[in-house]
Image (cartoon, rainbow, N blue to C red):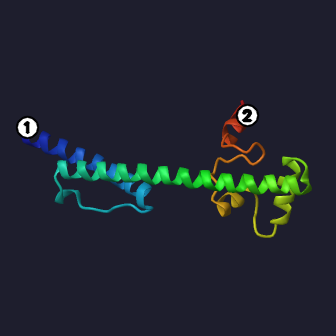
Amino acid sequence: MNNELHNAHVDTLKDVLYSEISDASKDANGFRRRLDVSEYSVAELEELADYYWKAASEAAAEDERAYARAIEKFEANIASVIAAGAGDRETALRWFRDANADAWMGDESIRYALGLPWDYDFDHGDRDLFKRQAALAA
C-alpha cells in the first residue's frame, strides 16, 4: 500500500512538473516541449522546469525591452507629426490613423504591426489602457 501511495505521489508530481515545463517552454520558445515523463526522474524534471522558467523570464525581459524601443520610436513619430503641424496629440493620432487606414483595421492591428504592447494606450502614451477601461466600467 505504501509503495502504491509513493508511486501515485511521484506520478502526480511528474504531471505537475510536466505541466510547468510545457507552459514555461511555450513562454520561452513559442512552442511546448513534449516529453514522456516516465523516462525522467523527478529531479530531472525539476531541472528542466527550472531551465525553462529561467528561459521564459529572459524571453519576457527581452519582450519588455523590445516594447520599450517600439514605444520610444512610436512616440518620436507622434512628436514629429505634432511638430509638423498637428498641434496636439489627438490630432496627430487622428492623422496617423487616417494615413494608415488602408493597412490597418484598428488600434489592435496598429499595435501588432508596430511591435507595441497589447496594453498600450495611444491616447495617453502609456500602458494603462485596461486600467482606465476597468475604472470606467466600475
- Answer with left or right where residue 6 lies relative to residue 121: left
* Local secondary structure at mark 1: helix
Outermost residue on the top side: it is 138
Q: Which mark is residue 2?
A: 1
Q: Residue at x 34, y 53 (%)?
A: 52
Residue 97: horizontal and vertical position, in percent? Answer: 82, 59
Q: Classify residue 94 as left or right of residue 17.
A: right
Residue 1 seen in render: no
- For disc 1, the neighbor class at 10 Å (few under 14, some 14 to 19, many from 20) is few
Between 10 and 56, the one nearer to me in the picture:
56
Residue under the point 19% across and 52% down:
44
Nearer to us of marks 2 and 1 is 2
The residue that appears at 71% across and 36% down in the rendered structure is: 132
Q: Which residue is mark 2?
A: 137
Which three-letter amino acid code belongs to the residue tagged 1? Asn
Labels in figure, total: 2
Residue at left offset 18%, top offset 56%: 40
Closest to the observer, 10 or 29 = 29
Q: Are marks 2 and 1 in contact (CB under 8 Å)?
A: no
